[in-house]
């Protein structure tokens, strides 16, 4: 299984695999009723978990992060499960997804997670080390929408598809890496941009 191989390369919370099993079960139960994700087969969920944690191989350590548009939990909830020492803010405006995220948080006892039922541009009471997002909007708009939650030295991790090169041309960033895995491009904008 690719997940087990990936976990060998990453410093991750000891309870992560057990949390993943519970998450998979809960997502499959809730997903059938509430249409949380189009892909509910175990293999598809495991691929999304792998996709979520893969960047832990190359990003710097962080003490707090905010995930914009967490949806069914990718990547924010999975990152919070992987690193229970980091304060995680899962920002999701859709209430059925907020309910699911809170249910998983409480079931797994994730004391590091705070689920925020709002749009990121309306939040002004948190500042984080890392801002993540997967499949929400283009890079320029994400950078603009998140200025109110970033610190001077925040980093960004955006899970992107094939249009990434065009998006990079539209924004003025200096210190970044693009890492590719399968059909995913990870844009890691390092601290200080």
Image (cartoon, rainbow, N blue to C red):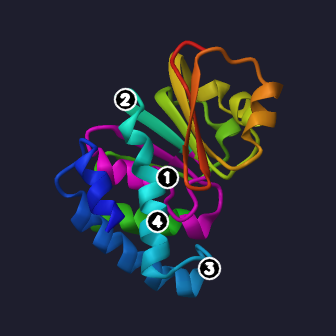
Q: Which disc is residue 75 wearing?
A: 1
- Would you say residue 79 sits in the magenta stretch? yes
Marks 2/1: CA distance? 15 Å
Residue 183 location, x and y as percent? 62, 55
Q: Nearer the viewer, mark 3 or mark 1?
A: 1
Identify the disc placed on residue 47.
4
Badge 4: residue crowd in 10 Å (few <14, some 14–19, many ≥20): few
- Residue 172: which disc? none
Cα–Cα gap, marks 3 and 1: 18 Å
Q: Can residue 40 be seen in the rendering of this structure?
A: yes
Q: Position of residue 135 (x, y in %)?
A: 67, 52
Who's the residue at 49% across and 63% down the image? 48
- The tag on residue 62 is 2
- The segment highlighted magenta reads 68-97
Q: Are marks 4 and 2 in contact (CB under 8 Å)?
A: no
Which residue is labeled 3 in the image? Answer: 35
Q: What distance separates the C-alpha of mark 4 from that of mark 3?
A: 18 Å
Query: Which badge, 4 or 3, is on the more N-terminal residue?
Result: 3
**Which element is circle 3 on?**
loop
**The quadrant where residue 1 appears:** bottom left
Q: Earlier in the sequence, mark 1 or mark 4?
A: 4
71 is higher (above) or lower (below) than 38: above
Residue 102 place in picture, x, y as percent: 43, 62
Q: Nearer the viewer, mark 4 or mark 2?
A: 4
> How far, Cα to Cα, is label 2 from label 3?
32 Å
């Amino acid at each position: 299984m690719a997940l087990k191989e990936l976990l060998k390369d990453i410093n991750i919370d000891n309870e992560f695999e057990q949390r993943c099993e519970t998450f998979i079960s809960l997502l499959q139960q809730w997903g059938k009723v509430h249409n949380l994700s189009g892909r509910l087969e175990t293999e598809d969920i495991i691929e999304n978990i792998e996709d979520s944690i893969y960047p832990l191989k190359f990003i710097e350590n962080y003490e707090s992060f905010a995930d914009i548009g967490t949806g069914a939990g990718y990547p924010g909830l999975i990152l919070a499960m992987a690193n229970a020492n980091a304060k995680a803010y899962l920002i999701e405006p859709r209430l059925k997804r907020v309910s699911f995220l809170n249910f998983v948080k409480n079931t797994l006892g994730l004391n590091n997670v705070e689920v925020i039922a709002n749009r990121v541009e309306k939040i002004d009471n948190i500042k984080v080390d890392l801002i993540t997002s997967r499949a929400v909007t283009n890079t320029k708009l994400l950078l603009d929408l998140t200025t109110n939650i970033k610190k001077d030295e925040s980093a960004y991790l955006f899970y992107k598809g094939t249009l990434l090169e065009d998006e990079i041309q539209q924004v003025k960033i200096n210190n970044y890496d693009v890492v590719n895995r399968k059909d995913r491009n990870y844009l890691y904008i390092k601290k200080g941009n």
